[in-house]
Image (spheres, coloured by chain):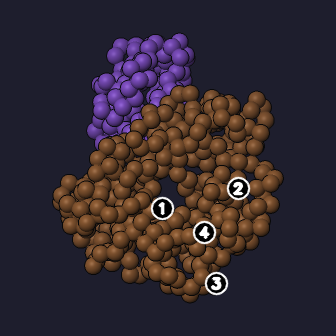
Chain colours: A brown, B purple
């Protein structure tokens, strides 16, 4: 049987459509993906992200992660990768600096058990799965609504900073391309927050909207843009690899960056028809790559996506076609993010 | 009278012509429709032929002809407003019309009561 979050029964009561996501029963939509997407872009929405995991870590974490933690202040958090020796991406994660040598690392759901094994073999780490849950509140009104409804003063909370309250930890982060927060607390406290937010007009959003929001904002997803066969070099995210510090996989990463065999590009399709994960990218008759994510995105009203292609076809404005099995869809390489908040 | 297929298309037969769409259940299962591909006018379809594609945010679904006939008209409003299928699946969100129809022998059609029972 799949795992369930503390909020599972609430999703079922709200008549959410439930799906399997990395071994978890999660809501994919409540009243409709587009309505939920638009709610986050224009006002506020909340997400059950309890399936994600976090580790409490003590010691010198820098050699294990790609991001530079030496320059990270206590009270801040930073995005980066867990890489293996070949620079393959084990996971993408965010490290919160809780104290001088105390950290919280937040990781994806399906990769969490392997991540924990990898990390705990190398440093003192505690899996917070049994004690902690998380929700995301996202949208231009997210901070104001969390303050109004939960009574948390967020006025001094800057981007990629966190703040501890008596019953929770709040960071100004998210995965939607909008302003917003992630709230970490005990399972019981998270369930109470969810009920209070809902009772005060913050509506829930599912993984469907989370996916269109992150795609539109140009944010990669583990299992799609990232996996063990890819490194930050092919994925175009070298900015999250420290230049100053050494870390597992760094030597291999620098080698791979010199001789790219494929590279992630953002593309836009001519029509509203979507390309989908796994479809082949072609130039004439030759196969030059494969799609990793693709969807119609509501705010930009266009079908966009990501693909790994031969590095010779990554120049902005270059065109290729995507074979969906019945037709060739015309695509143009464009800049990511597809959407930037005003 | 409306008839339905196991693949959740509906067909409304009037004389030798018919209108085709997808059922309320189908649009609900698909979610927000974002794109519709319809057959060219004049295309001759046999019952069971793929006649087009309906895409939602999450997935693409083939639509099959419930009966045989020739495409006489397509719902061009769906190009700019595919959400009509969600809003009015069994009326304004129709997909295409056929002429010179012949009844299906591949997939027996269900009336509304039988379709409701089929959905369970």
Q: CA distance from mark 3 to mark 1?
A: 28 Å
Sequence-earlier tag: 1 or 2: 1
The residue lying at 46 percent from left, 25 percent from top is B67
Judging from the image, mark 3 belongs to the subunit labelled: A
Mark 3 or 1: the one toward you: 3
In the depicted structure, whether residue A117 falls above or below residue B109: below
Confirm or deny contact between disc 1 and disc 2 (CB under 8 A).
Answer: no
At horizontal 60% and vertical 82% (from top left) the residue drawn is: A60
* Same-chain status of marks 2 and 4: yes
Q: Are marks 1 and 2 on the same chain?
A: yes
Is any part of residue B116 visible from this angle?
Answer: yes
- The lab-note entry on whether marks 3 and 1 share a chain reads yes
Which of label 1 and label 2 is nearer to you?
Answer: 2
Q: Position of residue A173 (x, y in %)?
A: 42, 60
Decide which of tag 1 and tag 4 comes sooner along the chain.
Answer: 1
Labelled pair 3, 1 in contact (Cβ < 8 Å): no
Q: State the residue in front, B36 or B117.
A: B36
Asked if badge 3 and badge 4 are on a common chain, one would say yes
Q: Which residue has dot 1 on it?
A: A21
Sequence-earlier tag: 2 or 3: 3
Q: Secondary structure at mark 4?
A: loop
Which residue is denoted by mark 3 in the rendering? A122
The chain that hosts pointer 1 is A
Subunit of label 4: A
Q: In which quadrant of the rendered image does the C terminus of chain A lie?
A: top left
Q: CA distance from mark 1 to mark 4?
A: 31 Å
Quickly name the residue at label 4. A68
Quadrant housing residue A196 = bottom left
Is label 2 or label 4 in front? 4
SS under mark 2: loop
Residue at 33 percent across and 31 percent down: it is B89
User: Which residue is labeled 2 in the image?
Assistant: A233
């Amino acid at each position: 049987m799949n795992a369930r979050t503390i909020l599972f029964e609430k999703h079922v009561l709200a008549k959410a459509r439930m799906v399997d996501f990395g071994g978890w029963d999660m809501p994919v939509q409540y009243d409709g993906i587009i309505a939920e997407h638009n709610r986050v872009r224009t006002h506020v929405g909340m997400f059950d992200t309890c399936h994600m995991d976090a580790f409490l870590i003590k010691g010198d974490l820098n050699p294990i992660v790609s991001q530079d933690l030496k320059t990270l202040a206590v009270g801040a958090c930073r995005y980066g990768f867990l890489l293996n020796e070949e620079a393959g991406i084990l996971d993408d994660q965010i490290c919160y600096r809780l104290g001088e040598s105390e950290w919280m690392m937040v990781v994806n759901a399906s990769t969490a058990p392997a991540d924990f094994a990898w990390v705990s073999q190398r440093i003192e780490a505690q899996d917070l799965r049994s004690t902690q849950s998380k929700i995301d509140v996202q949208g231009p009104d997210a901070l104001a609504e969390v303050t109004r409804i939960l009574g948390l003063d967020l006025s001094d909370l800057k981007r990629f900073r966190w703040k501890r309250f008596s019953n929770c930890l709040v960071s100004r982060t998210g995965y939607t391309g909008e302003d917003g927060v992630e709230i970490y607390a005990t399972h019981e406290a998270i369930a109470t927050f969810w009920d209070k937010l809902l009772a005060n007009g913050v509506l829930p959003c599912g993984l469907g909207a989370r996916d269109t929001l992150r795609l539109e904002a140009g944010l990669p997803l583990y299992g799609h843009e990232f996996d063990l066969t890819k490194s930050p070099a092919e994925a175009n995210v070298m900015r999250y690899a420290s230049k100053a510090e050494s870390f597992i996989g760094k030597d291999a990463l620098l080698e791979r960056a010199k001789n790219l065999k494929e590279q992630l590009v953002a593309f836009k399709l001519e029509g509203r028809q979507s390309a989908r994960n796994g479809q082949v990218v072609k130039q004439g008759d030759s196969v030059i790559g494969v799609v990793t994510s693709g969807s119609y995105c509501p705010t930009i009203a266009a079908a966009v996506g990501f693909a790994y292609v031969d590095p010779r076809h990554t120049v902005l404005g270059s065109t290729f076609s995507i074979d969906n099995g019945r037709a060739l869809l015309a695509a143009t390489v464009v800049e990511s993010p597809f959407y930037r908040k005003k | 009278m409306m008839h339905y297929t196991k693949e959740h298309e509906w067909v409304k037969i009037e004389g030798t012509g018919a209108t085709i769409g997808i059922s309320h259940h189908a649009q609900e299962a698909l979610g927000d429709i974002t794109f519709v591909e319809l057959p060219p006018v004049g295309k001759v379809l046999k019952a069971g032929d793929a006649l087009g594609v309906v895409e939602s945010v999450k997935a693409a679904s083939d639509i099959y002809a419930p009966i045989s006939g020739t495409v006489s008209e397509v719902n061009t409003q769906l190009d700019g407003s595919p959400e009509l299928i969600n809003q009015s699946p069994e009326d304004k969100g129709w997909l295409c019309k056929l002429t010179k129809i012949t009844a299906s022998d591949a997939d027996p059609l269900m009336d509304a009561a039988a379709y409701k029972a089929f959905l369970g």
